[in-house]
Image (spheres, helix red, strand yellow):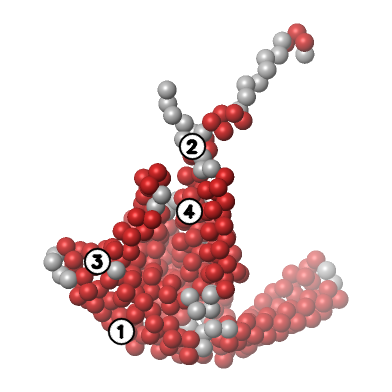
Amino acid sequence: MTRRSELPGPRQTIFWLITAVALVLLVWLLRGMLLPFILGMALAYVTHPIADRLERLRVPRWIATLLVLGLFVGIAVLAMVLVVPLIANQAVQLLQMLPQYLDLLRHRILPQVNHLVAQVGGPRDVADVQKAVTGYVGTASSWILGMLGQVWSGGVAIVDIVYVLLLTPLVAFYFLRDWDSMVAKLDTWFPRKHAGALRGLAREIDEILAGFIRGQATVCLIFAIYYSVALSLAGLEFGVIIGTAAGILTFIPYLGAIAGLLASVIVAFIQFTDHSRVAIVAGVYILGHLVEGNIVTPMLVGDRVKLHPVWIIFSLMAGGALFGFTGVILAVPVAAVIGVVVRFAIKQYLGSGFYDNLVEPLPLVDPSEL
């Protein structure tokens, strides 16, 4: 007789629910100071396979840790020296020219809207549309500038950036040096009766996170470089900052693609009077998106990431709304953990006696009685 899987008892369920609620509350209370610790842990998670390989080559763990983090920090410093000043310069120029761009966009679009309204309405309708568009453009300009000001004052100040840059490598060093011992210690904390199942869940979570974080980070890097270079060669103003943002947003399904394409086309439409130049800019982004979705992402990420695109988008929005930038960073790992646990719980439920007790055969009805 096949033994049915057992669902956790009420006490176990209550214990884990209380633990989860307490953890969420703790993250919410400490969200303002967690960023360097989360980034350091993420950096250690991404790089620990390299440190493990060096250790297998008889390199002491602490030396392997220094080599890996030294290489990463060196690449980051090189990128900051070469790329960040260019992006910062273009960002400042974009903020300065944003009101002019919005005004120019209004003058480009408004005549076409007036012509369309004149075909279906009258002069009064045209006047109403002009007034509405002027008001919306002014409101949009004020809103964008105000939002950027709030972002800066809300945690992206110079002191915070320096704090994160200095503390993150230090945290990453200790996590990476002690990674294997910490994992082994956590394994000893598993309830012995359920240790096998919990190890299986941990392996599945690690597979999903490795596929998403390592694979998708590589995809984002590739296409940040591609879009930046291609848009700059196409002559688009602010091509580097738009291309970098488009590449980073690649990890958000659909939303990133739509935002990047719209931003590129709008700037091209304002900048160029020749529509063929606008088509070239749009073609650069469409080609990149097709290559990313059909070749690069399947090759680097594959089907290991068992996260539905809607679930990823929801988790990012919910994490940002609840915990700010820290929540955005935690969103996908937490979504992956929840997804694995939910699938495991459903599998356990479907194999339990509780599920069978809910499914009762329907009574047979004599057709003559209908």
Residue at position x 38%, y 74% in the image: 40
Name the element at disc 1.
helix
Residue at position x 24%, y 77% in the image: 66
Q: Which residue is mark 2?
A: 6
Compared across the picture, whether 171 is left or right of 102 comes to left
Residue type, label 2: Glu
Q: Which residue is mark 1?
A: 78
Q: Earlier in the sequence, mark 1 or mark 4?
A: 1
CA separation, marks 3 and 1?
Answer: 21 Å
Q: Earlier in the sequence, mark 3 or mark 4?
A: 3
Q: Earlier in the sequence, mark 2 or mark 3?
A: 2
Q: Earlier in the sequence, mark 3 or mark 1?
A: 3
- Residue 24 is situated, as x and y percent measured from the top left of the image, at 55, 64
Residue type, label 3: Ile
Compared across the picture, whether 69 is left or right of 248 comes to left
- Residue 160 is situated, as x and y percent measured from the top left of the image, at 48, 86
Query: Mark 1 packing: few (<14 Cα in 10 Å), some, or many (20+)?
Result: few
Q: Which residue is mark 4?
A: 307
CA separation, marks 1 and 4?
Answer: 34 Å
Tag count: 4
Query: Mark 4 packing: few (<14 Cα in 10 Å), some, or many (20+)?
Result: some
Residue at position x 47%, y 31% in the image: 4
CA separation, marks 2 and 4?
Answer: 27 Å
Name the element at disc 2.
loop
